[in-house]
Image (spheres, rainbow, N blue to C red):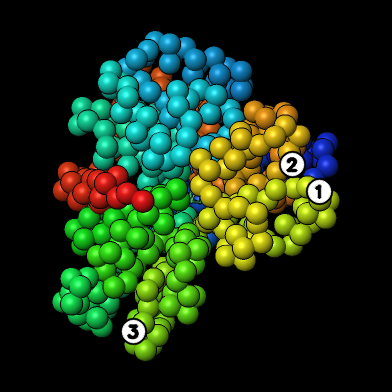
Amino acid sequence: MSSVDSTIQRLTLGSSPGSTCTTDLAKAPWHFDAGAPSYGPGSSMFDAAPPATPRQGEIPAEYRTATDGELEDRILAAKRTLGDRVVVLGHFYQRDEVVRHADFVGDSFQLANAALTRDRAEYIVFCGVHFMAETADILSRDDQAVVLPNLAAGCSMADMADESSVAECWEQLQELYGTAPDADGRVPVIPVTYMNSSAALKAFVGRNGGIVCTSSNAATVLEWAFARGQRVLFFPDQHLGRNTAKAMGVPLELMPLWRPRKALGGNTPAELADARVILWHGFCSVHKRFSVPQIERARAEHPDVRVIVHPECPMEVVDAADAAGSTDFIQKAVAAAHPGSTFAIGTEVNMVNRLAAQHPEHTIFCLDPVVCPCSTMYRIHPGYLAWVLEELVAGRVVNRISVAPGTAVDARTALERMLAARP
Ligand code: SF4
């Protein structure tokens, strides 16, 4: 099976049927790095990037003009030279042209932990997005440097909950609910942040008695929080929060949406009084693309199809699917199926296509027929990977992601609570 990159090239040239959300995906990211801060082409392109979005300076021309084959050779040679001194991590949603150079492939938390198994690695090159590199820096040793090949590889969902909006929300909630625990010792609100958030927010929840969750353990983490709090403030992904709490039996009317920068998040005090989960108004633009009509179409065309979607998808999509779960859940479900199974998968297209290539015994396709990868993952291109690796060979660390020590301590507290939380 061809990679998503080569599929987009063919779609753009008109030499292959099908469609892509934007033909700009056929251009390399450096065409967008020089412009105003933006998420670039792909599924998040219409989200507003915060003005403080890190800018990626222009990489040298030799990397921008090299052929795919030349970049491949240079990456392999640099990795060979660096040996055990470097570990390259590749997120599931990365393009194949990058992932093939990864020592580990996984989700953000799996990768941060995988890096810890490489004691001799001085450099952790994270082919993912900014919050993932921050998490790797928090969990790694002080003498290890975490490098993000393109600084513009952020995450539009993580950016939807900035530290000052969350602090403002927290202040309003404390004013409304007070801070005194009830007769059972439960405080009024426990903050819970999804792994897909900045280190500053992980530190915020760490300082305020809260916890981090992943898409694999969100239910366990909510149980942990309900044991200690009367309600939860869940950010930044409303869909993961809603889908998880709904499956645990929390009624929808007890899950108000908090719209940042609005008084009481756009709610009345009465609406917030009985809240069990206050959902931040954030979402992932990749998973927001999946829809119920796509599921109906997949079922009409493939009567035996099993539809599995990620819990970052909207609630109606999760409800209409056969199953919902993390990337790890999706992988395991595909691996455990009888040969000849058909799957329509609702998650990022690079991962779906890779699963299809790894499991030729099944029919696997992306639920969304339009080829539209995560625009921020897409900012990592082999040219940037070659550049950061060759800089390391030359003894220069570029694009280092460092979390301030005070922030790292509090964020680690929140991560450790997550690791200690048991089902
Ligand atoms: S897939 Fe969604 S949550 Fe993941 S990095 Fe892209 S925008 Fe962020």
Q: Quadrant of the N terminus?
A: top right
Which residue is the site of mark 3? 273
Q: CA separation, marks 2 and 3?
A: 46 Å
Residue 416 visible somewhere in the drawing = yes
Nearest the camera: 349 or 219? 219
Which residue is the site of mark 2? 342
Q: Amino acid at mark 3?
A: Ala
Judge: label 2 CB < 8 Å from ligand 1.
Answer: no
- Disc 1 packing (10 Å; few <14; some 14–19; many ≥20): some
Q: Badges 2 and 1: C-beta atoms under 8 Å apart?
A: yes
Q: How far from the left and from the top, in percent, is residue 375?
A: 55, 47
**Placement of 407 over or under 104, stated as above or below:** below
Labels 3 and 1: the sequence-earlier one: 3
Nearest the camera: 8 or 419? 419
Judge: label 3 CB < 8 Å from ligand 1.
Answer: no
What residue do we see at 40% from left, 34% from top? 111
Labels 2 and 3: the sequence-earlier one: 3
